[in-house]
Amino acid sequence: MANRAGALSLTDLLEALGRTSIAFAILILSLPALTPVPGPFGMFFGTCLAIVSLQIIAGKRRIWLPEMLGRRKLSAATIMLVVRYTTPLVRKVEIILQRGRLRALTGHTAQTLLGVPVFLLAVAVALPIPFGNFLPVVALVVISMGLMERDGLATLLGILLAAIALGTSGGLIYGAASAFNWIV
């Protein structure tokens, strides 16, 4: 599609992805938060993830983008570059994932319910905890890959990782609050 037009808008890209656009949005917004560079990466991408998760909770089947963002174009060269570098990784992941396992965890109802842990993980990503993004992002990546491949077992693993990530983040917050005598 990008080769014909020379560029592809973000709205067109999400429409082309169809049912997997929500999982793709979670994946794309999660990965930059792994950047171990100090700055607003976690807060920015965590906030974007929270907005996406609220749309998931509302039962949306596709991600809505503000017009200003949706009109943004990705060049065919950029898309081809991403495809070239991600295809080997995707092939490896697809070997592990199997479509149809625990199918109930990948349907529309399950996806709507998954909006809650995605929201909580997005908040954890947005928090300024040094290296605190790693576990929440891993959980988000596993959840998104499970949804994209419709592998409920992977989705379940993502939920378990989410519980571990949220427990760890909560523990870090509690430890910091205790260290500064913020907890009575």
Image (cartoon, helix red, strand yellow):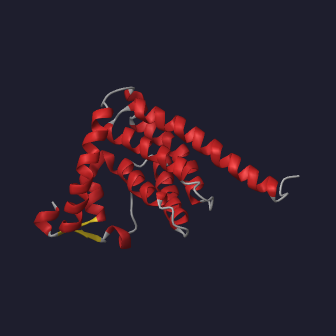
Residue 51 vs residue 162, the one in the foreground: 162
Q: In the picture provided, is 150 more to the left or to the right than 129?
A: left
Where is residue 77? Give x, y as percent. Answer: 19, 67
Residue 96 vs residue 63, the one in the foreground: 96
Residue at 37% x, 73% y is: 68
Q: How many marks?
A: 0
Q: In the picture provided, is 36 more to the left or to the right than 18?
A: right
Residue at 33% x, 67% y is: 70
Q: Residue furthest right?
A: 184
Residue at 15% x, 60% y is: 1
**44, above or below 172, in the image:** below
Q: In the picture provided, is 138 more to the left or to the right than 25?
A: right
Q: In the picture provided, is 154 more to the left or to the right than 179?
A: left
Residue at 38% x, 56% y is: 28
Where is residue 171? Give x, y as percent. Answer: 70, 46
Q: Residue furthest left?
A: 4
Q: Residue furthest top?
A: 102
Where is residue 136? Give x, y as percent. Answer: 53, 48
Where is residue 13? Give x, y as percent. Answer: 26, 59
Residue 56 vs residue 29, the one in the foreground: 29
Snapshot quadrant of residue 102: top left
**32, above or below 119, in the image:** below
Snapshot quadrant of residue 93: top left
**72, above or below 36, in the image:** below
